[in-house]
Image (spheres, rainbow, N blue to C red):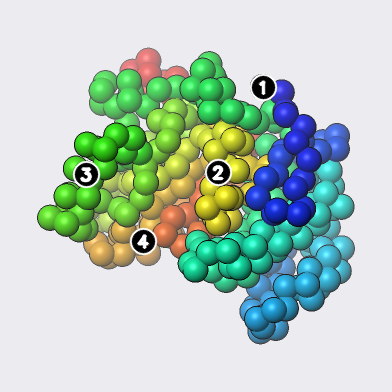
């Protein structure tokens, strides 16, 4: 799965690639736990500071502010372990700021409605990049569909081997009409999401989701719907489509190597189960199994290398059983 080597498009702010300088070594998850905790704390502090300073038309000053802060020790400890190191990570962060500016100028409403949101998502996604940023990405949709590294979820669902819910994107006029009618009759029957473009995932991700689903069933109120997944493996091609629509879809992305999941959160507020779900995910993060990012409606979850081997074994045992 070779990289296309596309350049960063600083002018439009829409097209980015995972191509970059030679990769830095992956941060050992166990040894990096103190650094990761300090990094997450620094991101929280930075967001509070940036929110207090944010004013309309002040994007250029935000770029200067961020470029200076990325050299501080708590940020540098993680960013130096990403592909391309601190200079490349800083350049990509400034691209996110420019992408935000273009999105708010050309669209009346954008998913990246607040400058702090895409910055926070980007910075926390750099933890994923220290783990998986050196892996070749799925550059095209076709690579996702043909990859032998991914398993077919529909085949597993038919065998009763999935504990979580998802739905495919509506690709026909008839399906879209049926979804629209369903929302009118039963508006809270399913999350307001487009659905999976690719119902394929790494075995490690399937094992993690099955474990989370079983745990969620234990801690959530009776009669709760199963865990709902809104996104799994993606291509770089699709990631750039999302950017064109104004989403804070960063690259390199753990979605584009198959180790990331987006889990519905807002829908479960209606059932009073969002707090239990949030606590469950944060507990997994504290154990070093995942990195989580609050993206509003969904929470992004990335499998760590520390957990991947055990999850692969768990998947094989489930399939054998």
Q: Earlier in the sequence, mark 4 or mark 3?
A: 3
Q: Earlier in the sequence, mark 2 or mark 3?
A: 3
Disc 1 is placed on an element classified as loop
Total label count? Answer: 4
Q: Alpha-carbon neighbours of circle 2 within 10 Å: few (<14), some, or many (≥20)?
A: some
* Residue 263 placement, left or right of 107: left
User: Is residue 119 something one can see in this rendering?
Assistant: no
Give percent across and percent down for residue 229: 38, 44
Label 2, label 3: how many angstroms apart (C-alpha)? 23 Å
- Residue under label 2, please give it: 241
* Mark whose residue sits in front, 1 or 4: 1
- Residue under label 1, please give it: 1
Q: Earlier in the sequence, mark 4 or mark 2?
A: 2
Front position in the image: 306 or 239? 239
Label 1, label 2: how many angstroms apart (C-alpha)? 19 Å
Relative vertical location of residue 66 with respect to residue 242 in this rendering, above or below: below
Disc 2 is placed on an element classified as helix
Front position in the image: 205 or 145? 145
- Residue under label 3, please give it: 177
Of the 4 image quadrants, the one containing the N terminus is: top right
Disc 4 is placed on an element classified as helix
Label 4, label 3: how many angstroms apart (C-alpha)? 24 Å
Residue 44 tag number: none
Q: Are marks 2 and 3 in contact (CB under 8 Å)?
A: no
Disc 3 is placed on an element classified as helix
Label 4, label 2: how many angstroms apart (C-alpha)? 24 Å
Q: Alpha-carbon neighbours of circle 4 within 10 Å: few (<14), some, or many (≥20)?
A: some
* Mark whose residue sits in front, 4 or 2: 2
Give percent across and percent down for residue 106: 58, 64
Q: Earlier in the sequence, mark 1 or mark 3?
A: 1
Give percent across and percent down for residue 173: 26, 38
Q: What residue is at 71 percent from the left and 23 percent from the top?
A: 2
């Amino acid at each position: 799965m070779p990289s296309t080597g596309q350049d960063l498009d600083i002018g439009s702010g829409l097209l980015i690639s995972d191509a970059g300088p030679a990769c830095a070594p992956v941060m050992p998850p166990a040894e990096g736990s103190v650094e990761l905790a300090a990094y997450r704390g620094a991101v929280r502090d930075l967001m509070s500071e940036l929110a207090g300073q944010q004013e309309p038309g002040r994007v250029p000053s935000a770029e200067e502010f961020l470029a200076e802060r990325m050299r501080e020790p708590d940020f540098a400890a993680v960013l130096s372990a990403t592909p391309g190191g601190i200079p490349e990570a800083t350049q990509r962060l400034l691209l996110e700021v420019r992408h935000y500016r273009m999105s708010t100028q050309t669209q009346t409403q954008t998913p990246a409605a607040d400058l702090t949101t895409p910055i926070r998502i980007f910075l926390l996604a750099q933890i994923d990049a220290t783990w998986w940023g050196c892996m070749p990405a799925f550059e095209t949709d076709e690579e996702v569909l043909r990859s032998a590294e991914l398993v077919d979820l529909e085949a597993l669902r038919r065998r009763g081997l999935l504990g979580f819910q998802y739905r495919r994107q509506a690709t026909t006029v008839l399906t879209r009409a049926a979804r629209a009618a369903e929302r009118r009759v039963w508006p809270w029957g399913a999350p307001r999401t487009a659905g999976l473009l690719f119902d394929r995932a790494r075995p490690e991700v399937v094992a993690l989701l099955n474990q989370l689903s079983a745990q969620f069933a234990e801690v959530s109120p009776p009669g709760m719907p199963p865990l709902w997944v809104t996104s799994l493996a993606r291509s770089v091609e699709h990631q750039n489509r999302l950017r064109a629509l104004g989403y804070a879809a960063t690259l390199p992305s753990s979605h584009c190597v198959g180790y990331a999941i987006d889990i519905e959160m807002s829908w479960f507020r209606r059932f009073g189960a969002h707090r239990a779900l949030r606590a469950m995910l944060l507990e997994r993060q504290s154990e070093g199994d995942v990195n989580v990012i609050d993206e509003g409606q969904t929470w992004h979850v990335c499998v760590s290398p520390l957990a991947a081997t055990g999850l692969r074994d768990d998947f094989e045992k489930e399939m054998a059983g």
